[in-house]
Amino acid sequence: MIRISTIFIAICMVLVAASLGLILYSIAGISGSESAIVALTALTFLILYNAVSMRLRDRTDVGGQIADLSRGTADLARQVAEFGRRLAAVEGRVVSANSAGAERIQAVVGEINELGVLVKQLAVSVANHDDILATVAVAVPPARDFDPDHEPQKELPLSAEDARIATIATAFMPAPAAVTNEQASSRSQAQILGAVKSAVDENRIDIYLQPMVTLPQRKVRFYEAVTRLRDDKDQILAADDFISVAEAAGLVGRIDHMVMLKCVQVLRRLMVRNKEVGVFCNVAAATLGNPTTFAQCLDFLEANRALAPSFVLEFKQSTFRNLGPTETEHLAALAQRGFRFSIDHVADLRIEPRELADRGVRFIKVPAALLLDQRQTSASDIHPSDLSDLLGRFGIDLIAERIEGERAVVDLLDYDVRFGQGFLFAPPRPLRPEGASATGEASPNKAQESNGSGKAASVDGPGIDPPRATGNAALARRTAAPG
């Protein structure tokens, strides 16, 4: 397409040539044919000049473009060379890492071989001990009844080898007291199992509340629901006493379902006074892994989905470390409904906050003694003083539990711990008995009289008096509930 500037130049050249011819014709007196020839000659000269100048200008532009293209090509070649150098460096690192990994694998294989040799030696030693015991059983004659009519025979001295065998046999023979203790333990387990079955069938499951406070203000922010069972004699059984027996008997699912029901009732009554309060409810690994029991709990939690921001489900650290496909699916179902999780019974500080946050964990309880233990510095991947900041980056709050002294609180403040729990603030206390005032504490005798049978008040009662945080550890221990 012809440019406007080219058309304008052509018109100007025609006008210049025509003007030149007209001037020659009118002023110089040259004939019209001669003036036309001169005008055409001038027009031709102007056309040639314009063509040559445009060609020179285009050549200059093309030369500049070629120079720019050459520079761009040189830059591209330099970048390709740089990428090649980096790729070679990466390949070198990969090769060195593979070689180092192969060396580590070889070292591990060597250690495994050494362990195999040690196991074989241990098996040989055990076999030798078995042979010695068998020899002793054959060599020792059976004991005879005492006969008063005959004179007792003198004992013959043992040889050195027989004395050594007898000593080894004596060390391996079980003591009668151990058998008695085992029988007593079995009887105790049977009694606990009977008490647990009776408590579950008759709904003798009580909820004790222990506050979790902010540090250093010591304002109550959450409550942990602690489960207690009462036998037919109204004796209190703590969770550590009956939980293993309940799991073995398959009753822990029913207990967790009943505890969830009571915790939701407690939370509804607590939120009447304070909308910011929350309740931690413990859930056993057996409940999480049982599809039937979990379905019942999930239906109940779905019906109370509005309380999800204030209702925290608490699991052990071992439960999260041994999650199977079923447990993972159940946790995802709870997280999808808005429920948050907490981890307690922490045995070490090898924690992956990103993975836990992705699963819905928002709280981690760590014993104060574990946080303040200097030996954890070398045993964990992070210094305990940096744990709170690390968890906070992933939206997880650190709670220091089992705090029993003011000195521990001062040290934990240096670790930037936001929440605390322990006997220093308040022990687990039962709910306020029915008929007690909203501000006063009912005495045990009055509580028994209000219930008529001496039993603890049900959570269905009209009033709840949660424990308040205190700062006196001795007072907390004196007022601690039994069990």
Image (spheres, rainbow, N blue to C red):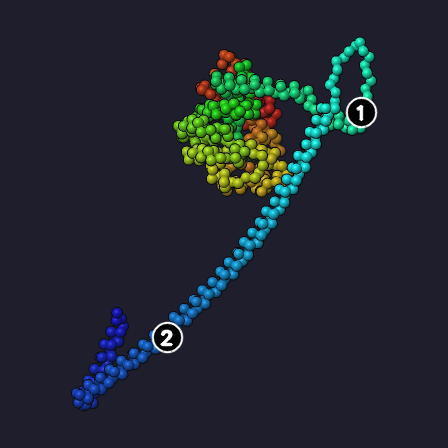
Quadrant of residue 412 in the image? top right
Q: Residue at x 57, y 42 (%)?
A: 386
Q: Which mark is residue 270?
A: none
Query: Dot 2 corresponds to which residue?
Result: 60
Q: Which mark is residue 158?
A: 1
Q: Residue at x 51, y 17 (%)?
A: 198
Q: Is residue 438 above or below residue 360?
A: above
From the top left corner, tell me how far across and down residue 139 is, in percent.
74, 24
Q: Which of the two residues, 197 or 116, is positioned nearer the viewer here?
A: 116
Q: Residue at x 47, y 23 (%)?
A: 254
> What quarter of the picture does the C terminus occupy?
top right
* Residue occupying the far front of the picture: 138
From the top left corner, tell me how far across and down residue 261 is, in percent.
45, 24
Crowdedness of circle 2 by 10 Å Cα count: few (<14), some, many (20+)?
A: few
From the top left corner, tell me how far across and down residue 46 is, in percent.
27, 81
Q: Is 432 displayed left or right of 102 in the figure?
A: left
Element type at mark 1: loop
* Visible residue check, residue 207: no
Crowdedness of circle 1 by 10 Å Cα count: few (<14), some, many (20+)?
A: few
From the top left corner, tell me how far across and down residue 379 is, in percent.
61, 40
Q: Is 439 displayed left or right of 414 in the figure?
A: left
- Mark-to-mark CA distance, 1 and 2: 121 Å
Q: Which of the two residues, 62 or 31, is positioned nearer the viewer here?
A: 62
Q: Residue at x 58, y 27 (%)?
A: 423
Q: Is 397 displayed left or right of 3 in the figure?
A: right
Q: Is residue 13 above or below residue 104?
A: below
Q: Which of the two residues, 65 or 103, is positioned nearer the viewer here?
A: 103
Kind of residue at badge 2: Thr
* Visible residue check, residue 298: yes
